[in-house]
Image: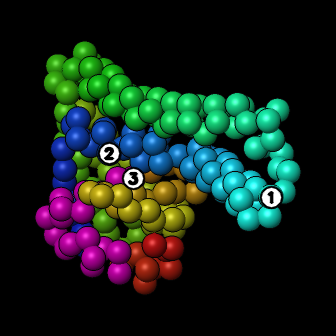
Amino acid sequence: METIFKNQYTVNRDYYNEYYFNNIVKNKSLIITSGIWISFLAGEILLRLLISAETVLLSPNYLPFSLFLTFILFPCLWLTRVFRYQSAASQRCNQLREAYGQDYYYVNIEIDANSIRYSDSNSPYSIYYPLNFINKVKKSQNYIILLTKAKNAIYINKKGFLQGDSELFLDYLRRKGIQC
């Protein structure tokens, strides 16, 4: 098959920072839990201020617990996520350095009419993903992330196109019926 798009990039510390930020800090469960808690607490405050109702969380019995959760526990959870993603990126670079003698490698991706071929400089093998295995497309700051039905993620650098560009590639995926 004829290659329609080619993409090449270096996996290094910047890549891992973005990868782990998207997978650890932007975790939906923590964002949803925090949003629900903040909404609930805001509702309690509004009820107390507007109609002087006795509320559950702001009653004298629960106020210390509510304040603890809001001002200590949730910020600590967010901070641990930030530190965790940075330490995970450092750890991955250290693992690469130990295994391959360098903390980076090169990725080549070629897309034809039916498949995506992924190869990197650390392996003599290529992985082929049929395009119909791509379930969903997400975007981060620098990458287009293709998610497969088996929950694999293929990262494609937006600025790494040697043939085609990121907008043409996204249009191509939409024409193939892939949710972008």
135 in relation to 107, above or below: below
Q: Nearer the viewer, residue 35 or 130?
A: 35
- Along the polypeptide, which appears first: circle 3 or circle 1? 1
Total number of numbered labels? 3
Residue occupied by mark 3: 154
The spot of residue 133 in percent (x, y) is 52, 62
Q: Residue at x 59, y 44 (%)?
A: 30
Q: Residue at x 16, y 69 (%)?
A: 163
* Extent of the magenta region: 154-171
**Quadrant where the image shows the N terminus:** bottom left
The amino acid sitting under disc 3 is Ile
Q: Which mark is residue 177?
A: none
Q: Nearer the viewer, mark 3 or mark 1?
A: 1
Residue occupied by mark 2: 18
Q: CA distance from mark 2 to mark 3?
A: 14 Å
Quadrant of the image occupied by residue 14: top left
Question: Tag 2: Cα neighbours inside 10 Å, few (<14), some, or many (≥20)?
Answer: some
User: In the image as oriented, which residue stretches furthest toward the left?
Assistant: 162
Q: Which mark is residue 52?
A: 1
In the rendered structure, the answer to whether residue 180 lies left or right of residue 73 reads left
Q: Nearer the viewer, residue 84 or 136?
A: 84
Q: Residue at x 27, y 43 (%)?
A: 15
The amino acid sitting under disc 1 is Ser
Does the magenta-highlighted stretch encompass residue 145? no
- Along the polypeptide, which appears first: circle 2 or circle 3? 2
